[in-house]
Amino acid sequence: MLAVLLTSCITHPGVKLLIFEETSKPMKKVLKKIVPAIDEKQQLKALVEELREKIEIKARGYDERLYVRLLGSSARDTWLRDDKDIDFFLFFSEEYSKAKMEEIVTHIGRHVLEHSEKHYAEHPYIRGAYMGFDIEIVPCYAVSSPSSMLSAVDRTPFHHDFVIKRIEGKENDVRLFKQFLKGIGAYGAEARVEGFSGYLCELLIIKFGSFEGLIEHVSKMKFGEVLGFGNIDKEKVKKFRGDALIFIDPVDANRNVASALSRQKLALFIHASREYLKKPDEKFFFPEKRKIEAKFIVLKFRKRSSEIIALSFHSPVVIDDILYPQVKKTLKNLSKQLKLHGFSMLGGSYHVEKKITILFELESLKLPEAKLHIGPGVASVHENKFLEKYRKGERALCMPFIKDDRWAVYVRRKFSSAEKCLEHAVKEGLPRHILAAISKNYDIYTGGEVFERIDIKFLADYFDPIFSWEY
Amino acid sequence: MLAVLLTSCITHPGVKLLIFEETSKPMKKVLKKIVPAIDEKQQLKALVEELREKIEIKARGYDERLYVRLLGSSARDTWLRDDKDIDFFLFFSEEYSKAKMEEIVTHIGRHVLEHSEKHYAEHPYIRGAYMGFDIEIVPCYAVSSPSSMLSAVDRTPFHHDFVIKRIEGKENDVRLFKQFLKGIGAYGAEARVEGFSGYLCELLIIKFGSFEGLIEHVSKMKFGEVLGFGNIDKEKVKKFRGDALIFIDPVDANRNVASALSRQKLALFIHASREYLKKPDEKFFFPEKRKIEAKFIVLKFRKRSSEIIALSFHSPVVIDDILYPQVKKTLKNLSKQLKLHGFSMLGGSYHVEKKITILFELESLKLPEAKLHIGPGVASVHENKFLEKYRKGERALCMPFIKDDRWAVYVRRKFSSAEKCLEHAVKEGLPRHILAAISKNYDIYTGGEVFERIDIKFLADYFDPIFSWEY
């Protein structure tokens, strides 16, 4: 702990020691919870050695040149006590086909791990368990530099090499940072979170020297800030324009380590940092469980006097990194359809559990039958078609008339009820897995039904949003 | 009549005689109604001579050099039987002050006319009656050319001189055209109509040779068409860009004779021309009285299932050319206010009689209490002010939350009822005379009340628009 404070003070001489003394109180408590005990570390070390050997023996049965490395947080002592992820990388020479690598790694997994399962990122890898730990075995190519890599995972060894040389003495700062992000819901680069990857956490701690140095910096951060080590090539940075945060990968200047970070999550982190500096509290790291009184949430909703409609269906069986983008796209597409048909939206949100809920808050679930339809210019080439269609047409609610220099007519809306509009919109134009799930079955709830059927924590977050450290 | 047909055929050799034979039937009937009988013309001539002399004698009592001219349609035999307007112009030399001219012309009017009244256009002139005719006496400067004119009315003698030399034999075409415009509601350049002035009618007939030649041309007219006599200076035309029709004044190339014509009225005229060519009918010139069944109009409204709200107040005592622009501006401003406060408008209209009505058709007269308010960026300089205001504020319906990279909060609307919104909006920002009239008293009607209180012809035109020739 002292080492942490010392580093911070050296890196940021302007920062008052006073703050650190205050912040150190919750940090001490947090560190006790998240730093593995010495015997836990020893247990991990022993287990890793045992498993590494088992994997390597199996691998060398195929090819003497194959070798295994432990990478990731467990290799750098930056793992959190409750996150027992152990990542082995199996290195192949470049002559191996991806199919062959998959075959070998699958075989090894089946023999060495419990519940071994194939997973797919850019390429297949194996997940399983060993003595209660979550294990991954990732096949990769042994390349001499990141520039000659054949797959994204080939970069990982270089990440490890970069971090391991610089992280010593700052491991617990990484742990604090990771736990802080977990607490506020911004840890992880996966689509479900759109937050900070473990590697990004380590780079940020290396960059700012300590957890507090980082928090101090972030509390004044602007969107689109460019971070990195050494000189930054301004030309290369251009392509990351629009990203919430740009951290040039020290092993590959063409890559933004923070590319998966959303503006929403960076904003949340910036705000949390500012609030933490004002009033450091363990709750930022370990939020309390939100206490929800359904009656109170309903009251919050009633006070808005808006109307709600929710689409609910069984979640398709597909990994989160595919599911979440599709759910977000569904919310976006359906919102667009509702707006297109004239419904005014106050807001919308989604919730994923066994069932997926897409919630819309509207000004009204009903619209008048009539809408104004502006047609072609008077005496334009399209005039005749327009007049023929609407002088007799079913849809017209009056005769066409002239408005300025154009034709206009009041026509019957396609959908005057939001429910009908949604029922139509879910039939097409939605992402594949969502469309398939909805085609099996779905429900639409409105008003009070929503509160009977939909997860109250989700509705509380929507109608009564509070930050996790304020629970 | 024959002369008319002949001229048309010569000017537009491609036009089939057949059309003219058919159109000639309604035109013959119309001409019978609108061309003054020979004895009427003689009566007018005698009266004009008598009055001209009276005015001149009075004028020369002041100054021997003053002289009187009869200008306008009665001087060019293009007047309609029912429009007995007689316009005298009294010519002053340039040494006269406008005040002196006003004094003299007022004095003459008082002695020569019945019910003589001062009116104001760009400058004062006298209106009164004489033997059942409407008389105007307009003071102007005797200038040698339009370029040296001191007031807009100084141009009128030159207009007269231009037309009188070219209109012979086409007087009845002018009458037909004027009556056609009257029938469809587009005759007159005044703000109430925004249509065609008498002078523009004459120029168009001179340009296209006949009523039918004109109708034929207009049926294919495009907006922004540039007309004139002789070469047209393209540079000078530029400043009229955006005008519905450009007719370069033959006596002043810097002036568009059609500048007062709205796109709405030109579109109406173009459409009427096309319909007239398809099926010539006396109804274009003399529409029937619209037969309105209130029950049927209410039904039309109910089918739209929209909501209506009407503002009604006593019309201020002010000339139409001031009143109408102010009424239009009122409709525009109040529409803007309603939209600004979140009300979705399907349409709006106004009606001027003893009382003025401003009508709005809305999707709903009620809005939910809540609206989404997007605030400053997270960590921006305005953040603190925003958070302070909405964390405790009366208006917030939830705690501020982060939306992408900005703060957001649901707040109570200022007006969730259109009635309250209008009541507030009529208090300021409206044109002077309207504001004064409303400050005395006004009513707001909604739904069924509107049909009880507001002119049914106006509501019929709004909810069941049909063209006057289809009545």
Image (tube, coloured by chain):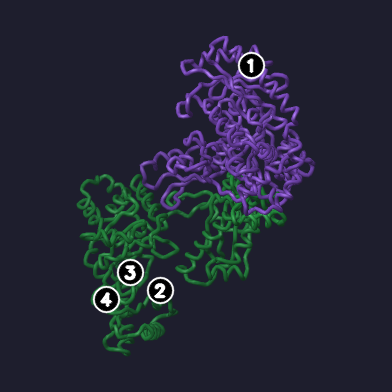
Chain colours: A purple, B green
The reply to whether the C-beta atoms of the residues labelled 2 and 1 are less than 8 Å apart is: no
Residue B13 left/right relative to A317: left
Mark 2 belongs to which subunit? B
Q: Which mark is residue A53?
A: 1
Estimate the spatial distance between the alpha carbons at disc 2 and disc 3, rounded to whole Å: 30 Å
The answer to whether residue A363 is visible is no
Foreground disc of the pair 3, 4? 4
Q: Secondary structure at mark 2?
A: loop
Q: Which mark is residue B40?
A: 3
Labelled pair 2, 3 in contact (Cβ < 8 Å): no
Circle 1: element type? helix
Q: CA distance from mark 1 to mark 3?
A: 123 Å
The one of B15 and B359 positioned closer to us in this rendering: B359
Instruction: Indicate the position of residue B347 as horizontal and vertical percent values.
Output: 53, 51
Q: Are marks 1 and 3 on the same chain?
A: no
Query: Which residue does the numbered mark 4 point to in the structure image?
Result: B148
